[in-house]
Amino acid sequence: MKAKLFLEDGTKLEGESFGSEINSSGEVVFNTGMAGYPESLTDPSYFGQILVLTYPIIGNYGVPPREFYESGKIWVKGLIVQNYIDKPSHFESLKTLGEWLREENIPAISGIDTRALTLKLRQHGVMLGKIDLNGKDEKQYDPNLQNVLPEVSRKSPEIYGEGKKTIVLIDCGDKENIIRSFVKRKVRVIVVPWNFNPLKEGIKFDGVMVSNGPGDPKKAVETINTIKELIKENIPTFGICLGSQLLALATGANTYKLKYGHRGQNQPVYDAINNRALITSQNHGFAVDVKTLKLGWVEWFKNLNDGTNEGIRHKTKPFMSIQFHPEASPGPVDADYLFDEFLTYL
């Protein structure tokens, strides 16, 4: 079945449908990773977005068991690829990518020159777009206009693992490998909704992790207010991705939207405190403005491609955040030690 992708600048691209035969709309973004489409599709940070994969062959290893997902469902509004492989070859494959997308009612288009499309998005910036399979007009959805965290966060607390230390993970759209990363370190994890304030709920905990997630960080006012209270009480707090932006906003710093964001597994960052470089996995469209950092806060990491901020920390207090994903699966493991560094604060 023929399918079309329309961008807000008037661009029209045609290809073949291999997902659900429905129309959809969202923000069109690209990811440069060479592997990991099951993890990307189940990353809640992609909520409201149509994902373009630049690697030219997608679907060749099928869909693995649930244990490899980052959440229980696909979050993208649509998928755009160049060449879709409908006959996967992998010993852990349970189904084809097309079958999975159709099961979850997600449209997908193949036959698109995704690298040319990526160049357009790099030059213009990410754009809103629509996937059209039936000629009916689709109302344009823009995930940046509202607080989308209620769409991706848990509705009630859940507990994982056992240990002498307890972390409260504020779920703004968390990737499950964050939980696994703490559990394998013998840490008890209480995962709570985005608007849950652990200080007001009478639970015992040693530190707080603020997770990744989608949308404009400035819309998550309740989470920002919770972080302000955590800082006031001097409770060890660690932010990942969106969590880094929320921590910055809670301290009085500012955030802004990047032209096309960082999404891939090969982003180099510089550790300005320890004078070393890491290769990281990233998925974000907003960044912290380091010029607005308040007294006592310093830039910890910065992106070696464009110089944007990749992490902040307090000089003397137990507060730290990073814009990349130390738990990335699949992805480089350079930054995995940061979980251990945070645990030294507890």
Image (spheres, rainbow, N blue to C red):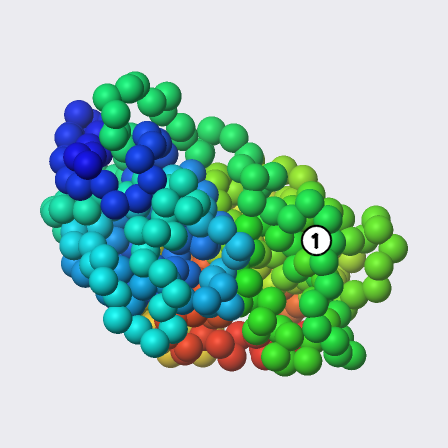
Name the one closer to the observer, 258 or 22. 22
Which sits in the foreground, 267 or 128?
A: 128
Number of residues whose C-alpha sits closer than 10 Å to that of mark 1, classed few (under 14), some (14–19) or many (20 or more): many
Q: Please, is residue 109 above or below residue 22 in the view?
A: below
The quadrant in which residue 230 appears is bottom right
Residue 253 visible here: yes
Q: Mark 1 highlights which residue?
A: 192
Q: Is residue 205 left or right of residue 325?
A: right
Instruction: Give the answer, above or below, for where 225 lies relative to 262.
Output: above
Q: Give percent across and percent down for residue 342.
A: 61, 73
* Quadrant containing the C terminus in the rendered view: bottom right
Q: Is residue 286 visible?
A: no
| SS at mark 1 in the image | strand
The x, y position of residue 87, in whole percent, is 23, 62
Residue at 30% from the left image edge and 51% from the top image edge: 98
Type of residue at label 1? Val
Determine the residue positioned at 29% across, 30% down: 130
Query: Which is more toward the observer, 149 or 275?
Result: 149
Question: x%, y% of residue 207?
Answer: 71, 66
Instruction: Give the position of the N terminus as an image quadrant.
Output: top left
